[in-house]
Amino acid sequence: MTIRPARLYDAAEIHALMQPYVAQGLLLPRSLRYLCENIRDFTVIEANGRIVASGALHFLDEDVAEIQSLAVAPARRGQGLGRQLTAALVEEAKAHQVWKVFALTHAPQFFYRLGFTDTDLGALPQKFSRDCAACPKRPVCRQHAVIRDIFAAESEAPAPAAALALVP
Ligand SMILES: CC(C)(COP(=O)(O)OP(=O)(O)OC[C@H]1O[C@@H](n2cnc3c(N)ncnc32)[C@H](O)[C@@H]1OP(=O)(O)O)[C@@H](O)C(=O)NCCC(=O)NCCS
């Protein structure tokens, strides 16, 4: 099993992996074109040459990023892959000195286990104005907003000079 940044040729497989969850209303639809344009946001887990999990870290502003499109292949759910992938996305956020990572999700319990807590969109005006304000599903949206302070323990926060060295 390998965890690695997605490459452009992974876009179609990521698209296919997401489809069952898009159909269930658990993930927002993403076109193949969108995935190609934003492929650098994505990390994948590969097993035997197939992508079994994928997810994205999308920067929203100077210190906030969103975990998006998190999907584990149906046959592989409950085996810790979602946890591994989310941990990798949080590490990526850390390396870029992003202070807060959030997600809009139908699976808040999964995120609570990884140190996220409830928040509301009022605390995320960037997200609300960019995506939610014009979303046709807004009146019936049942997604939970969850957030994690990456450097919650003050000792974990990088000094500004050290932060540069962290960015790959
Ligand atoms: C949600 C999802 C990414 C979790 O991935 P996974 O590989 O099945 O989860 P893991 O095996 O890593 O589980 C980690 C922990 O979360 C718990 N968990 C996983 N999914 C959960 C859920 N839907 N509700 C409650 N708890 C959940 C597990 O029991 C495990 O708990 P533990 O700490 O006691 O071991 C995956 O089930 C999935 O692809 N769901 C459909 C798409 C989706 O809803 N994505 C999230 C949108 S952002």
Image (spheres, rainbow, N blue to C red):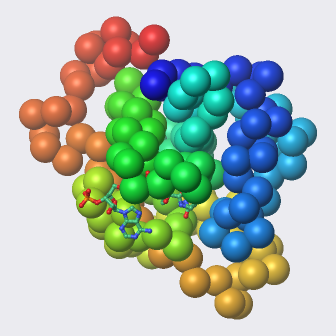
Numbered marks: total: 0
Q: Position of residue 109 (x, y in %)?
A: 35, 70
- In which quadrant of the rendered view does residue 54 lie? top right
Q: Can residue 97 be seen in this snapshot? A: no
**Rendering quadrant holding ligand 1:** bottom left
Q: Position of residue 32 (x, y in %)?
A: 87, 42
Which residue is at a point 70% across and 47% down the rendered structure image?
Answer: 17
Q: Position of residue 89 (x, y in %)?
A: 45, 37
Which residue is at a point 16% across and 33% down the rendered structure image?
Answer: 156
Seen in the picture, residue 39 relative to 56 is either above or below; the reply is: above
Task: Tell whether 4 sits left or right of 18.
Answer: left
Q: Can residue 40 be seen in this snapshot? A: yes
Q: Where is residue 139 in the image (x, y as percent from the top left)?
A: 70, 90
Q: In the displayed image of the protein, which residue is found farthest to the bottom? A: 139
* Front-lying residue, 66 or 39: 39
Task: Tell whether 36 sits left or right of 150.
Answer: right
Which residue is at a point 78% across and 46% down the rendered structure image?
Answer: 16
